[in-house]
């Protein structure tokens, strides 16, 4: 959409924005059915009731399955994109996850792709016809780019974000732009432009955030491959909360050129873009496709690391036998995870222990409280001035989690240059200490950087619980930890909250206020049906290795245990 | 050395520092001959007169030649290091390039290496016995670490810098620490601790800087492999001024952990370490040895890019034929290079034009004045507060080029966080624009980052002239340009100033004040014997490629044309 915010009030801006959004949904043909007047808490069953069997079949493919059918012409791109437009639009009616649909340009694109395949007898690229959903703050030519601020409405880029250009050249179809929170700095999705996006598995809970529209689209089946961004958990939280895969790559591997931010030029902590998908293969295809395009030639901050094919040496012990050493982080000792998370971890660990080739060791947390102090001191080095101005200049109210992370956050201070250098030194030292810790897990250091028997990956929670109730996602530590360290981290679905099994730990003594807050949040029945995910982490720039390790761990354990 | 600066005056600190230095020189056995009472301007012939033929033979090897003799036991490490201690110590007497010699620890180390080889019948590592000189501000366990400031004297690290540990494990011998300027931010070498280091080819001229002790050691033959650091030209200027090779790698390839800086935590413009050598092979061996040690496992800011072996595809045209496309930058259009530099460039270009497989194109400068505004605005984001405090706290006087680059530099301002983000955006945009420029030299863009016929390397001046008279190195643009862009750049010797040939361009109309200043500096006779070098530059992280291209260009042209 393009609108000028001109002299309009923020209410008018938001009203027009939503009106535009609803019009894009209304333009989908055939018309998207209305949601039932009384929605159940869990709406994930509704698409099957309200859409055609064919539409369900199309939208429940994995990316490689769909790729196979589209690249051979077995299915038409147009049919596929129409099904996704319908399911995403229905998702909007159920959980409010859409910023705008793009029916006309998506169908036009799909028609061109179908024509290309017919003429050339080959797909246009590795993503021929694959529908990709996009978090709003990745710029699209001629469309609004607001990053969740009313005051930004009316900014319109004159070209697509670099990442989108690459995906387009690979053959994809963009069809929906998804919701995000005010500031992009919530682990939920709540803005004055779009309202609150809720969790399709349990509408009383958050979809997560900040890529929450993407997460909810995954949960409701309106997307099988989408793009989020992550500086503290913003891909992984919504992926986890919606039973999807989500990957935060190492920094400077995927292009961020053309994404909107309230603090352009800030780079003390670097945000990344990354994929969410209903399959691990979708994540891998996305990563490889983008990196194969050598984006560093156009975006010089990127590192020219080609996408590596799996290397048998990654998981081989000294004698050449298959071996993965998994460090298990049960708790960060700041906030203890809720029972369903610990159960998920236990179930995976138990199965791995029974599998040949897996060595499980405890991974002791290393000063995760300090890690938070460092990253939170570096998120808003101007004391939140830019973010505040972006909110206040339109008069829109502060959403509760914007207040939480900026105004109520004692670590947010207007730094001097000297302060910021202090925190950079803290950051660098923490990273070095953590590397030393990791190296120390080796049985033997052969010199020349060859470590024998070191931990390969860390298995850990994604958060201190499954998706919490709205406005309660106030602990970032389980994801921001890996942003600070810049370790690639992937989340994957494991189970769902089972109120009968995941009972409250009644005699627990909280460690601190944050831990108490989190402990008190958990009431089993309140979390019913919420997906439970885990996170797998590798060392910086071992992006390919962590994804391969997850593939192997899934095979070994049979996870996810619940669909 | 270790001294406490305690309550001493800066004069006492400097006096004690120099006394210590002179004692280390005096401890070399056999005693180093005194320099003649009346030194000629060009002292490069004196070592041959004052040292033994054997010492000259040893110290005039290239690194691979020496490696061959040491790793087979043909020559003893002890004999080699003694010769280098003598020649470096003589260098101190001739051009004042030594911060301290390390005779005892170097000889002890060499003896141990000789013993190792005798026992194990193999070298301890790829640098077995190779003498390496080290710029003072790379920390050495138990030795002073002052970065050129009197106030820093007395700081003593409890471990070696990461880089030095790796080189040590590879078998090298550290024997000399070399001079550097106050602030490390001169393209000359002048401090209150050590005085002024001068150019061995012409003592009226500067040795360059800030790794000027290293440069002068190369010039006088007291080192064949040394370590400098570079944030604006500090490896390349002294290498060029002394007829040596010097390489500024891309950032985050070599470890900088444990080097001293007045602004730790600042990372808007990132300094690097890198080698100086009397041969290109010395540069390559250094790079490969360090990177083979996988330093990223201990220093997480580093990028895990293995050292690439030469790839025939680097220099192959579409039909598979050998082809190098060289962009020639004659002038940056801010300050025009002096006649000897333009002659050197012309001589190389003419020879390349006559060689099969070389395509020469003009490389138009792109806003080099803006590039300087950006980098100079980001060198001292605190307005020079930290540097000033490091100088003023001891009461030492400001050296002229410290005043020039900090106090008299209109771009040095105490930035707000907002200002620094502004300049980061300028920096990022400039880098992107330059990448676009480079991409535009391709004949065809095959997509997926495959550019056909793009320029491979840029050939350009290292500075606006050969080594200028003392305190006159006031234009950084030809080197700082590539720091801003983070392009790997190597300098190599080409010729020497020939006053009869390199006559002044009498009717030149200067472009601006800087250009006029530089133009007026040039008087042919004043620059007699000064080495003239050129610089070869490739795109970010094409470190291996730029070194290989230089090897080929040297073969094609026969450079250097004067020894």
Image: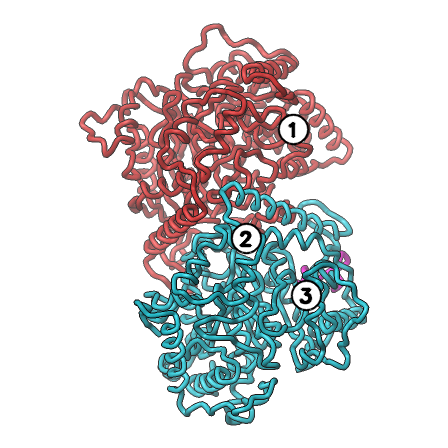
Chain colours: A cyan, B red
Q: In the image, is A356 to the left or to the right of B382?
A: right
Residue A498, given in percent of the width and then of the height, sits at 72, 80
From this view, report whether residue A452 is shown above or below residue B288.
Answer: below
Q: Is residue A315 magenta?
A: yes
From this view, report whether residue A556 is shown above or below residue A73.
Answer: above
Q: Disc 3 designates what residue?
A: A517
Q: Disc 2 designates what residue?
A: A412
**How far is the residue under mark 2 from the one under mark 1?**
35 Å
Chain letter of the residue beneath label 2 in the structure image: A
Disc 3, SS:
helix
Front position in the image: B129 or B275: B275
Q: Nearer the viewer, mark 2 or mark 1?
A: 2
- Which residue shows up at 47% across the image and 92% down it? A33
Mark 3 crowd level (few <14, some 14–19, many ≥20, 10 Å Cα): some
Residue A134, given in percent of the width and then of the height, sits at 46, 72
Q: In the image, is B71 to the left or to the right of A251?
A: right
Mark sitting on residue B156: 1
Q: In the image, is B167 to the left or to the right of A130?
A: right
Disc 1, SS:
loop
The boundaries of the magenta stretch are A312-322
Q: Are marks 2 and 1 in contact (CB under 8 Å)?
A: no
Q: Is residue B65 magenta?
A: no
Mark 2 crowd level (few <14, some 14–19, many ≥20, 10 Å Cα): many
Chain letter of the residue beneath label 1 in the structure image: B
* Mark toward the start of the polypeptide (3 vs 2): 2
Residue B129, given in percent of the width and then of the height, sits at 65, 30
Q: Nearer the viewer, mark 3 or mark 1?
A: 3
């Amino acid at each position: 959409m393009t609108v000028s915010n001109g002299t309009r009030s923020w209410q008018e801006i938001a009203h027009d924005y939503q009106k535009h959004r609803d019009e894009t949904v209304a333009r989908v043909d055939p018309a998207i059915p209305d949601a039932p007047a009384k929605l159940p808490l869990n709406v994930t069953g509704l698409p099957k009731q309200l859409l055609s069997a064919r539409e369900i079949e199309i939208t429940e493919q994995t990316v490689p399955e769909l790729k196979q059918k589209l690249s051979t012409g077995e299915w038409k791109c147009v049919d596929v994109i129409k099904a996704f437009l319908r399911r995403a639009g229905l998702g909007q009616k159920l959980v409010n996850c859409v910023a705008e649909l793009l029916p006309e340009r998506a169908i036009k694109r799909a028609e061109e792709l179908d024509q290309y395949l017919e003429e050339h007898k080959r797909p246009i690229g590795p993503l021929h016809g694959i529908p990709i959903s996009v978090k709003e703050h990745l710029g699209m030519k001629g469309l609004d780019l607001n990053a969740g601020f009313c005051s930004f409405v009316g900014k319109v880029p004159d070209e697509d974000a670099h990442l989108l250009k690459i995906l387009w050249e690979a053959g994809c179809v963009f069809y929906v732009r998804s919701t995000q929170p005010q500031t992009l700095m919530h682990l939920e999705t709540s803005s004055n432009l779009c309202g609150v996006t809720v969790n399709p598995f349990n509408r009383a809970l958050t979809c997560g955030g900040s890529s929450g529209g993407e997460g909810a689209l995954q949960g409701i089946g309106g997307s099988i491959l989408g793009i989020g961004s992550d500086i503290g958990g913003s891909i992984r939280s919504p992926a986890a909360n919606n039973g999807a895969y989500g990957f935060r790559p190492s920094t400077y591997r995927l292009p961020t050129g053309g994404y909107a931010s309230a603090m352009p030029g800030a780079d003390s902590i670097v945000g990344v873009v990354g994929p969410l998908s209903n399959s691990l293969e979708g994540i891998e295809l996305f990563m490889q496709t983008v990196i194969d395009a050598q984006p560093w030639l156009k975006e010089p901050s990127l590192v020219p690391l080609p996408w590596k094919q799996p290397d048998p040496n990654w998981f081989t012990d000294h004698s050449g036998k298959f071996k993965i050493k998994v460090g298990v982080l049960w708790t960060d000792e700041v906030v203890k995870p809720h029972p369903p998370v610990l159960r998920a971890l236990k179930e995976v660990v138990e199965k791995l222990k029974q599998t040949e080739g897996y060595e499980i060791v405890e991974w002791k947390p290393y000063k995760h409280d300090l890690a938070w102090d460092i990253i939170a001191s570096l998120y808003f080095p101007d004391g939140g001035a830019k973010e505040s101005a972006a909110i206040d200049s339109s008069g829109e109210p502060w959403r509760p989690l914007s207040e939480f992370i900026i105004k109520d956050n004692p670590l947010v201070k207007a730094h001097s240059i000297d302060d910021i250098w202090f925190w950079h030194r803290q950051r660098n030292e923490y990273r070095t200490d953590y590397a030393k810790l990791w190296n120390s897990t080796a049985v033997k250091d052969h010199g020349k950087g060859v470590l024998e028997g070191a931990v390969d990956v860390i298995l850990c929670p994604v958060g201190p619980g499954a998706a919490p109730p709205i406005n309660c996602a106030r602990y970032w530590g389980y994801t921001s930890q890996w942003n600070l360290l810049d370790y690639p981290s992937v989340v994957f679905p494991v189970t769902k909250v089972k109120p009968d099994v995941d009972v409250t730990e009644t005699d627990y003594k909280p460690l601190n206020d944050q831990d108490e807050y989190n402990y008190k949040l958990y009431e089993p029945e309140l979390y019913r049906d919420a997906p439970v995910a885990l996170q797998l982490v590798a060392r910086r720039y071992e992006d390919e290795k962590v994804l391969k390790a997850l593939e192997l761990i899934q095979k070994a354990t049979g996870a996810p245990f619940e669909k």
